[in-house]
Image (cartoon, rainbow, N blue to C red):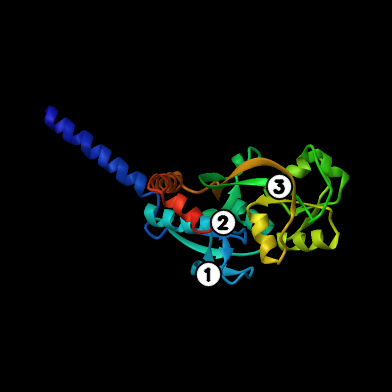
Amino acid sequence: MLKLKTRGLMLGLLLGAATARAEVPADYKVVLLTENFPPFNMAVDDKNFARDEGIDGISADIVREMFKRAGIGYTLSLRFPWDRLYKLTQDNADYGLFSTTYTAERAPLFKWVGPLGKTGWVVLAAPGSKISLKDIKEAGKYKVGAYQNNAVSQELAKQNVPVINALSDQQNVKKLMSGEIDLWVTDDPAGRFVAKQEGVTGLQTVLRFNEAQLFLALNKDTPDEVVARLQKALDQLRAEGFVEQATKNYL
């Protein structure tokens, strides 16, 4: 009798595991969205639209391997602008967005897998600038440019720093060099990477603040099993040194 009960218990556990796994159909796919945010994710041809292998970067390489390891299907496209991608991911089940900065304000809006990498925020001025700041609130005395609705611009709004928003950081580089803005608040190393692509070097770092981590943000209706499998795969990749090597490949 005990043997039969044991077999029954094992069968129940196996059926339970199978049922849990069956929550994700074999043809299940996540619609992955990303943007030009070098060196983490970017179009190979520098355009504002790309698909699949036309996208590279630190996070793109990690996410691809993560989904492969987790056995979860996906489609991947790079689009513009970020503001639209952010809303699409919030509004549509089984959508995901990277590289997304994790903040306390954003935490309840998505399900999260990460970190994929880390970044810092910097206030940059044109070469030769004499501007100095003690803290970010002092930036309010100047014309400040940022990228519309990304984590940096959201933080500036929270700090009551007036911002001239742009639809891309490429625009902010041009505005800074033309004198349309005095300061550009952006991510590092992404900002310097963009500036170099625009032929601009020697920017002055006026202030460095708020180290942050980059994640894959998934729509809140994404099955918990999908989130768990992706996180487990990422943890394995980090332990094996894949994440570190992917980062070194671009920096």
Query: In this picture, is 179 found above or below 2?
Result: below
Quarter-of-image position of residue 19 = top left
Measure the C-alpha gap from mark 2 to mark 3.
17 Å
Instruction: Residue under label 2, please give it.
Output: 40
Mark found first going from the N terminus, 2 or 3 = 2
Instruction: Residue under label 3, please give it.
Output: 122
Measure the C-alpha gap from mark 2 to mark 1.
14 Å
Q: Position of residue 15 (x, y in %)?
A: 27, 43
Query: Dots 3 and 1: beta carbons under 8 Å?
Result: no
Q: In percent of the image, x 75 and y 53: which residue is there?
A: 146
Name the residue type under label 3: Val
Mark found first going from the N terminus, 3 or 1 = 1
Query: Dots 2 and 1: beta carbons under 8 Å?
Result: no
- Quarter holding the N terminus is top left
Q: Does the image show residue 130? A: yes
Of tags 2 and 3, which is closer to the observer?
3
Q: Which mark is residue 54?
A: 1
